[in-house]
Amino acid sequence: MNRIKILFVEDDLPPDSADDMLWTLLINEGYDVTPDKTGAEAWESLQSTKYDLILLDIMLPPDHGEGIPVLDGVQRLDMGIHLLKELRDGKFEPGGTSRDVPAVVVSAVPGVDRWNKLGKLVGNDQWCLKKPVSPYDVVEAVKKALGKGNSDGEAEHD
């Protein structure tokens, strides 16, 4: 069996991800976790790797970088929503992450309109968590999004 791959997109991660409680809990659950801090980093990761779940903050610095014109002009407040929309539109297939990958959003996004958009893009309002939130609650949402009642960190691939 393969370990479940999670893309953890959060701009407030400490320089050493191991110093983040949520990161540590996910690793201890047996997940293979990749940290990204900007929209551009997440874009590159989603294009190059097939993840089993996306754990995403919505307010992210774009840090546009070279060669990602689709991120030009996207504001910090909407970067995560933009990434989710592109994901759901299949922009990262076939070599990257699938459009139907589950996503768990953890953010302090302001405004009911943004939360409504997120609920539609994520597909389950229970997976949209408003900061501040307990890291333990986030891990439980991750497990539910993966359809796992246990914590073995293993992907169930055919």
Image: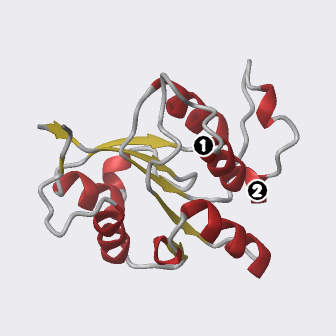
Describe the element under mark 2 as helix, strand or loop.
Answer: helix
| Pointer 1 residue | 87
- Taking 55 as reference, is 51 above or below it? above
CA distance for labels 1 and 2: 14 Å
Q: How many marks overall?
A: 2
Describe the element under mark 1 as helix, strand or loop.
Answer: helix
Q: Residue furthest front?
A: 158
Q: Residues within 10 Å of mark 2 (few under 14, many from 20)?
A: some
Q: Position of residue 1 (x, y in %)?
A: 11, 37
Q: Residues within 10 Å of mark 1 (few under 14, many from 20)?
A: many
Residue at left 54%, top 56%? 12
Residue at left 36%, top 71%? 141
Q: Position of residue 89 (x, y in %)?
A: 65, 42
| Pointer 2 residue | 78
The residue type indicated by label 2 comes to Asp
Of residues 11 and 3, the one nearer the viewer is: 3
Q: Position of residue 18 (x, y in %)?
A: 31, 49
| Residue 2 as seen in the image, left or right of residue 123 | left
The quadrant in which residue 140 appears is bottom left
Residue 111 in sight: no
